[in-house]
Amino acid sequence: MTQLEDQAATKQVTRRAVELVDVDIHPVMLGPDMARRLPERWGRHLERYGRRAPFVTDLYPRPRNKGMRADSWPEGGIPGSSYELLREQLLDEHDIDFGILLCLNAHDAGYEHPEYDAAINRVVNEWIVEEWLDRDERLRSCISVPYDHPELAIAEIERWAGDDRFVQVLLPAAGQEPFGSRKYWPVYRAAADAGLPVAFHTGGYTGHRGAGWPSFYLEEHAGYGVVMQMLLTSLVCEGTFAAIPNLKVVMTEGGALWAAALRWRLDDAWSQLRDEVPELDRLPSEYIHDHVWFDTQPMEEPDDPQHFLQVVEQADLSDRLMFATDYPHWDFDTPAQSVPRGLGKEQRAKLLAGTAIELYGLPTHVDRA
Amino acid sequence: MTVATATEAIDCDLHVAPAGVDTLLPYLDEYWRSYIDDATIRMGQAAYPMGAATTGAAPAGNHEELTAVLDETRPRRAILSCLALDGVHRNPHYGAAMATAINTWMRDEFLERDERLRASMVVSTLDIPAAVAEVERWDGDGRFAQVLLPVRNDIPYGNRYYHPLHAAAHERGLPIALHAWGRGGNAPTTTGVTTSYLEDYASNAHIAQTQMMSFVAEGVFSELPELKIVFLECGFSWLPPQLWRFDKDWKGVWREVPWVKERPSEYIRRHMRFTTEPAQLPQDPEQIAQVVAMVGPELLLYASDHPHEHGASSERLLASLGDEDAEAILRGNAAAFYGGSIA
């Protein structure tokens, strides 16, 4: 009897509406687990040579608890490495109907040997299936892909696209080239054709900001949204959305409210400069509305809650914004306390579940113990 | 540029540029004249391609051309900005020599001939002692209203590398003005150079946000409590969410930056100002009013940004303002921010 069957047999099953979807949860694979799962050459390579990209916490050390919730350290592991603790602290505690896993272990693997990059992504996905998805019917995940080696990334998408527990393809906020580059379009096309959104998550190798490197984690973290603005500007201006009409992208853990000013900025710029880019035949704000979703993490919090509501309206985000906890990071948002006051009942329901249900094709009701 | 509603304004960003490098040769010594001649150096205007609608006409290149502009815009005061030093040159000695040449040219060509005019002082960004010497050179002149730096450079401006320059400006009450564009060799993104001018153009706002955070996070205002920063041609409608985000993060990780003693937005609201062009605003007047209220009209300084053409947002902005906010943005805020030589 599997664990799931065991759960079903011992508890009464009831049918309930899906009311809470968490679209940004971070499971973490420990180094020895990765080394053990890799093919022999790459396991040895990992142990002897490690990884090429500087680790982000080495660039910008997190000043307390390594940037994690203080209570999220499992015995013998690191935050996010224990399914049992995550289930207890997140899924059960907050009664989450569906949680989407974004494992960042392969985020900056684009700097590796192509086959090493591919192997890292493959074992991350296998580990996600075996250690997470197979153990809890509430969990969904992203397909990690070797995005900087597009033909290998497409193979990885094809490998998992038949498993509907993988609901999107995961990329970081920066790769070897700007993500609007045509180099990446085959990856986006493969995702879109498989019916999968592409999620860009904060992170990857994003130190230089067009003005040199900042000095502090405060700047790095408060600048996540700025990096997302750069990324979305690249996608729009290089014609990615014009070229791939069925592409849906999700900007994760970069905030969302900056989207209003970005839309005005790009619309004004396009109105003046459209003769340079005739392939963009619509206002940038229209491409953004039709193609781009956002999560709430980390929520931008004005002193006046009315301002939040105003910007949601200005940015036309009412059916584009999805709740995320960002477990187990230090700035974790709880569904009970962090959703801004003043949202109407319908809009709150969309933010907490409805928009994600629609985007990811999740069921509206579930039979759960 | 909005002419009709903005007469008698204090125009904080009006562009001039020498028609060619020959104009500056009289202000350079024999070594630099031969350097320019040997290398056939031309004035770089990579940031403003002549065919782009945003570029508009050529900036005024002499007093007569500028007078024609002023006859149209009719400002009470105008602060001239010359971006001719921005470019991709990496030679710090050249940058320092050209800065002196450009400032002296602006004095002779414009400041000496029209009492309404002030200028932004150009300095080398690759040789900070030379930049400090340039600031000192103009002591007593009183017509250089701010120190001009390109918003794009190699190291964020809060970094200690720039401290002597900020201290020199602080000592004299001169704002540091960060203008759109700058060092052209650096990509305006985390990853690479953009394939379109459109994207490059939109990127000034992203880099301005990075610079804004750098000044606060590095504690510049704790050491230089009266230092003033103004962002020229970088927009301002991006401010509110970025301030909310910055404040919230500081509340979480202040231990990393103990020299930041107040909420970041308090430093920014006290020390920083933003010019109105480009305005980058929504179409709906009600939403424009929301944005102005969230930003705070007290942070905005009017600029014509002549001859650049960023679209209709700034006209919508001025049309949306009540009398009190219009007076503040067109004149009052600049008079209070710059003080003496501008008011």
Image (cartoon, rainbow, N blue to C red):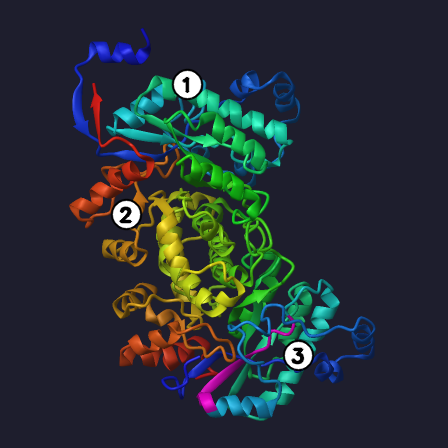
Q: Is residue A350 above or below residue A38?
A: below
Judge whether residue B73 is colored magenta: yes
How far across and how far down the image is residue B140, in percent? Answer: 59, 83
The answer for which chain carries disc 1 is A
Q: Which residue appears at 17% of the width and 24% of the height?
A: A15
- Quadrant of the rendered structure where residue B35 is? bottom right
- The residue singled out by tag 2 in the image is A319
A194 vs A223, nearest the viewer: A194
Q: Which residue appears at 54% of the width and 92% of the height?
A: B67
How far apart marks 2 and 1 lie (CA) works out to 33 Å
- Asked if the residue at tag 2 contacts the one at tag 3, i.e. Cβ–Cβ closer than 8 Å, the answer is no
The three-letter amino acid code for the residue at tag 3 is Ile
The three-letter amino acid code for the residue at tag 1 is Glu
Q: Which mark is residue B102?
A: 3
Quadrant location, the N terminus of chain A: top left
Q: Is residue B201 above or below residue A295?
A: below
